[in-house]
Image (cartoon, helix red, strand yellow):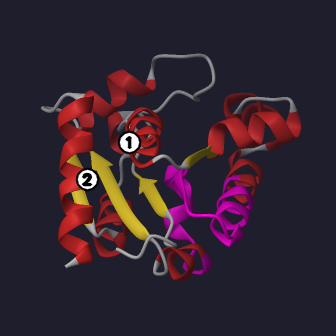
């Protein structure tokens, strides 16, 4: 992996994008961008609040905007992307220029994790759609199942994959 390349962590809500992304950024001494935090900073509202007041489509548009802005930034960073962005062809094209990490877990685990925290909107296990999984898989340079791995093990797997990509 070229050092100038962004690392974008994708996956469903509750998959560990922020946790893995933060630790990965520290390990690589890079800036970390999180779409949820960027949206809250920009709007003063959580994704849950935006979805409730403006609708899910408005939230997804904001998620797309903040990801595209992060990827367009020149300094290599670790970026945690919202799950919805993978459905957008413009985003998938932008991801092609980055090292893409898909973090995933069993749908029941994802649903349990998604229920935690006030910033997330409620998600049913059925919302972890196979179409998104297919798109995540297509974009991914590495897939990390966080359901049965510790954060440290997940980050180590990504770092190992980054080393393999440099060869």
Q: What residue is shown at x 51% (from left), y 68% (from top)?
A: 87
State the residue position of label 1.
27
Quadrant in the rendering for residue 44: top right
The C terminus, quarter of image: bottom left
Where residue 151 sits: x, y (%)? 27, 30
- Mark 2 to mark 1 CA distance (whole Å): 9 Å
Q: What residue is shown at x 63% (from left), y 24% (from top)?
A: 119
- In the displayed structure, 132 sits above or below 167; it is above
- Give the residues drawn in magenta, as a range: 63-90
| Prevailing secondary structure of the magenta residues | helix
Report the side of 61 relative to 87 (left or right): right
Q: Residue furthest left?
A: 148
| Magenta-colored stretch includes residue 5 | no
- Compare residues 11 and 108 and report the one nearer the observer: 11
Q: Is residue 159 visible?
A: yes
Q: Evaluate if marks 2 and 1 touch, with contact meaning CB atoms under 8 Å apart.
A: yes
| Magenta-colored stretch includes residue 86 | yes
Label at residue 159: 2
């Amino acid at each position: 992996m070229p050092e100038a390349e962004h690392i974008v962590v994708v996956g469903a809500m509750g998959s560990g994008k922020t946790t893995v992304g933060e630790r990965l950024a520290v390990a690589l001494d890079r800036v970390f961008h999180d779409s949820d935090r960027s949206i809250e900073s920009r709007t003063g509202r959580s994704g849950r609040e935006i979805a409730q007041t403006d609708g899910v489509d408005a939230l997804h548009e904001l998620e797309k905007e903040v990801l595209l802005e992060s990827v367009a930034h020149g300094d290599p960073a670790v970026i945690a992307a919202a799950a919805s962005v993978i459905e957008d062809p413009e985003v998938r094209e932008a991801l092609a220029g980055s090292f893409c990490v898909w973090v995933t877990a069993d749908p029941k685990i994802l649903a349990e994790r998604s229920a935690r925290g006030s910033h997330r909107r409620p998600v049913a296990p059925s919302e972890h759609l196979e179409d998104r999984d297919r798109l995540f898989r297509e974009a991914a340079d590495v897939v990390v199942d966080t359901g049965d791995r510790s954060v440290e093990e997940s980050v180590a797997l990504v770092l190992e994959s980054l080393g393999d990509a440099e060869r």
